[in-house]
């Protein structure tokens, strides 16, 4: 019998969506539904793990297994899920506050271990859920609820950080271009290893509608002249200050993933155990 062909609609849920009208995260959600259909992942083989934040609600809106964890902890839980069920597709998702502030430690170590996950970060440059405090990616000088005289800090650059840490797939998308973002999610999911997809996903309530215009005006789609396997080219792109790179920035294959390393270790432990028990037996009989 032919398997039933799933469409984006099959990945929607009946959970009421509580994001503000116009929130960029709607585009990310649509892209996730479309990517799941494109990849033909049966919902029972898909897991969406998130932290806490407006964006972290996204797991409830995808017809898949979901785990809305605690603030900043999506990545270690997603890594554990992938280790326990390596045959599943695991997407981790959340916000810039969740991933690059309280969750930075996990961001670092998950990349170092090359956990086979796709991490979709809805980067709106603000803490949305808690009503507009400064986040690690808020531009220097911007006025927020918690920085009334302007953000005194320089922003963190998640793309450059991921590259420096040895991430094996780094991309940036825009929630205003769902088709492009869907393709990035498809590529990131097919990639064997940790895939970071940072998404410019404007918060219309606390940063304003003009954020969509900013990305449209400054976004530059990477074309064939960009070679994502070239670390130096990728590095240059992550250092752009005015232009916003959109597309696959860096990608390398063949780096062992955490689940592969764990399976090898298990195999070695089994062999060692067998060897040790054979040695013991020989000792008894001699
Ligand atoms: C341990 C802990 N500290 C603080 C909070 C409060 N808190 C909830 S969401 C959030 C920030 C969310 O920002 P972000 O991850 O960027 O998501 P957004 O709402 O912008 O999508 C904070 C500080 C919390 N829930 N748990
Ligand atoms: Mg945010």
Image (cartoon, rainbow, N blue to C red):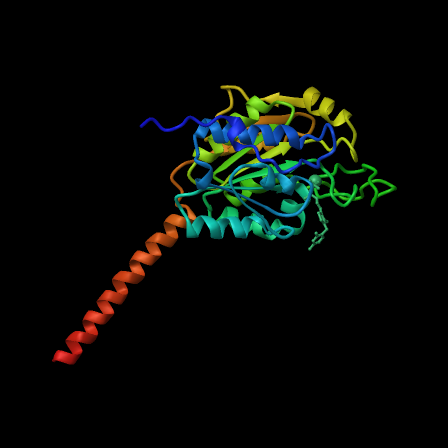
Seen from this angle, which residue lies furthest right? 149
Q: Position of residue 159 (x, y in %)?
A: 59, 37
Q: Position of residue 119 (x, y in %)?
A: 55, 40
Residue 57: quarter of image:
top right
Q: Is residue 264 left or right of residue 38?
A: left
Residue 184 visible in the displayed image: no
Residue at 49% x, 31% y is 36
Residue 92 visible in the displayed image: yes
Q: Nearer the viewer, residue 162 or 124?
A: 124
User: In this figure, what is the number of numbered marks?
Assistant: 0
Q: Quadrant of the C terminus?
A: bottom left
Q: Quadrant of the N terminus?
A: top left
Residue at 45% x, 43% y is 116
Q: Is 173 rendered above or below residue 63?
A: above
Residue at 49% x, 26% y is 7
Q: Is residue 188 left or right of residue 94?
A: left
Q: Position of residue 104 (x, y in %)?
A: 62, 49
Q: Is residue 176 left or right of residue 109?
A: right
Q: Is 110 rendered above or below residue 228?
A: below
Q: Position of residue 152 (x, y in %)?
A: 80, 44
Seen from this angle, which residue lies furthest left? 286
Q: Is 239 rendered above or below residue 267?
A: above
């Amino acid at each position: 019998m032919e398997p039933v062909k799933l469409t984006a609609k099959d990945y929607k849920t009946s959970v009421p969506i509580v994001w503000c009208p116009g929130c960029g995260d709607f585009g990310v959600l649509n892209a996730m539904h479309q990517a799941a259909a494109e990849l033909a992942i049966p919902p029972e083989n898909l897991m969406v793990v998130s932290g806490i934040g407006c964006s972290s609600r996204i797991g409830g809106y995808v017809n898949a297994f979901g785990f809305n964890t605690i603030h900043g902890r999506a990545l270690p839980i997603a890594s554990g899920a992938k280790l326990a069920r390596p045959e599943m597709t695991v997407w981790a998702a959340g916000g810039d506050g969740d991933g690059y502030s309280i969750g930075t430690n996990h961001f670092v170590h998950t990349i170092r271990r090359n956990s086979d996950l796709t991490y979709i970060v809805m980067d709106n440059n603000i803490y949305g859920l808690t009503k507009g405090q400064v986040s690690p990616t808020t531009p220097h000088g911007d006025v927020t609820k918690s920085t009334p005289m302007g953000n005194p800090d320089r922003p963190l650059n998640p793309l450059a950080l991921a590259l420096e840490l040895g991430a094996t797939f780094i991309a940036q998308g825009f929630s205003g271009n769902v088709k492009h973002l869907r393709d990035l999610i498809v590529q990131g999911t097919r990639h064997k290893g940790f895939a970071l997809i940072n998404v410019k996903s404007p918060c219309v309530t606390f940063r304003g509608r003009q954020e969509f215009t900013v990305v449209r005006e400054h976004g530059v789609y990477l074309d064939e002249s960009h070679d994502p396997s070239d670390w130096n080219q990728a590095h240059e792109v992550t250092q752009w200050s005015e232009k916003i790179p959109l597309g696959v920035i860096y990608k390398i294959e063949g780096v062992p993933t955490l689940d592969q390393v764990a399976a090898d270790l298990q195999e070695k432990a089994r062999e060692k155990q067998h060897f040790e028990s054979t040695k013991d037996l020989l000792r008894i009989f001699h």
